[in-house]
Amino acid sequence: ASSDAQANLGSVIFIRALVALSLVVLTGWAGQVSLGQFAFVAVAALVGGHLTAVTGVSFWLALPLVTALGAGLAVVVGLPALRVRGAYLAVTSFLFAVAVQSVVFSGFFKRFGPERVYRPQFLFVSFASERNYYFLCLAFVVAAAWMVSRLRASRPGRVLIALRENEPGVQSFGIPAARTRLSAFALSGALASVAGMLFVHHQRALDQTSFPATASIEMFVMAMIGGISSVPGALLGAAYLGIANLVIPNALLRNVATSGGLLALLVFAPGGLAGIAASVRDSGLRIVATRRGIAAPSLFADGDYEAMVARRAPLVDPLPYRGLEAIPPERRYTRASVFHGGAA
């Protein structure tokens, strides 16, 4: 059984994993660099906390409303992406995060933001305890990871990646690039808004110091460390950041572990922790295939497959004869030929 502190940390890791999943869709697949992703979390926390704590709206009704608001806001923020790329878009998104911190969480926060937020309840199950809320966050992460994985395997996911790699080629097939790119912003903003709703109810209050503009950069670094182009990478990055914050009490050392870790990964493993995990998996499968003589050319794309075949015995013992002579006499048979009228 885990303690309340461990369950609390697990909930935070799952909430960050949702933000990382939103970056996988937007940056990893659509190729749009966003340094203001945590601003959507902040807006969703502010509006969602007000709806549930001040207005009295149910959490389960406020959740789709806040998600739709986040998706629409992300589309508005993504409109400059139709004209600007790369560093310009990154700066634009970071300015949005700065604006949210300085404008929304200023005097407006004191009038609109709730002082106390209560955790939700579903039927007879209360999520007030840390353990129950942990499982609630876990359920949302599993659902989001499944949805994003299905998106990657579907036609819209393939179109997103094709648009990132070759936009003129995608447009030549009649696919609207602007609408496809904005749909990625909408889905990314929706996932971040779900994280905001879970975060404000996890904290049981809305503290403006919990949403600094630099948190967006921290989320981006987290996604890069895990592997920004894969769903497992989002989960690994969130776990890495959560464990680093737990075991490293010093802020300077934590920055070294995150920033320095990202620098090392960019040099030695550009695919992040997910790329390292995939390499370890493939290495283990190569060892198994080599020892058991299993034909798996896809595991030996670097040319080692031929060496494995040369070192190992053939998978099937070769027959001494070929053709009809390879068949035992008792298993041979004759058939009348329609052309020659004799036996074949």
Image (spheres, rainbow, N blue to C red):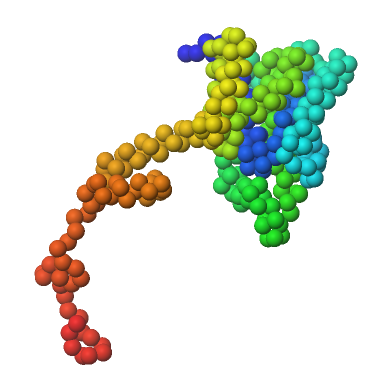
Q: Nearer the viewer, residue 188 or 141?
A: 188
Quarter of the view holding residue 194: top right
* Residue 326 falls left or right of residue 113: left
Point out residue 59 in the picture as x, y percentages from the top left corner.
72, 25
**Is 30 on the left or on the right of 239, as rendered?**
right
Residue 181's spot in the image, x, y percent? 72, 45
Q: Residue at x 40, y 39 (%)?
A: 282
* Image x and y of residue 114, in percent: 80, 15
* x 38%, y 48%: residue: 303
Looking at the image, which residue is at 70% across and 40% down? 32
Residue nearer the viewer, 153 or 62: 153
- Nearest the viewer among 155 and 50 is 155
Quadrant where the image shows the C terminus: bottom left
Counting labels gives 0
Residue name at image x 75 percent, y 27 percent:
39
Q: In the drawing, does residue 149 fall left or right of residue 207?
A: left
Residue 16 figure quarter: top right
Q: Is residue 66 visible?
A: no
Can residue 107 be seen here? The reply is yes
